[in-house]
Amino acid sequence: MNQEIGSNEAKATLPDLLRRVEAGECFTITHRGKAIALLTPTHAVRQLKTEAAIDRILNSRKHTLSDQQLDELKNQSRR
């Protein structure tokens, strides 16, 4: 779960925050109540990118064209 932490507190407790991030926790760093940064483990970012790529691949497979549709598209591009 993503926890919010103020920028001043993050600055004061950075070593502890890094240990917690290494253990898998995520933080949103805020400044005057506005979210300005995400502090997440690097493995989580890689996992999110991998999951997004898999979703794009699976979604692209859902949109198949018939032979007739492909022929029509080919003919349109030749005009």
Image (tube, rainbow, N blue to C red):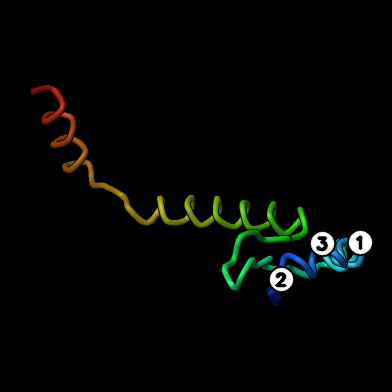
Instruction: State the separation of the CA atoms marked 1 and 3.
Output: 9 Å
SS of the residue at dot 1? Answer: helix
Circle 3 is placed at which residue position? 11
Quadrant housing the N terminus: bottom right
The residue positioned 79% from the left and 70% from the top of the image is 9
Are there few (<14), some (14-19), or many (20+) residues within 10 Å of tag 2? some
Quadrant housing the C terminus: top left
The residue positioned 21% from the left and 38% from the top of the image is 70
**What's the amino acid at mark 2?**
Gly
The residue positioned 77% from the left and 66% from the top of the image is 8
Q: Is residue 53 left or right of residue 40?
A: left
**What's the amino acid at mark 1?**
Pro
Are there few (<14), some (14-19), or many (20+) residues within 10 Å of tag 1? few
* Residue 40, horizontal then vertical, whole percent: 73, 61
> Residue 15, labelled with which disc?
1
| 9 or 20, nearer to the observer | 9
Circle 2 is placed at which residue position? 6
The image shows residue 44, relative to residue 1, as above or below, that is: above
Instruction: State the separation of the CA atoms marked 2 and 3.
Output: 9 Å
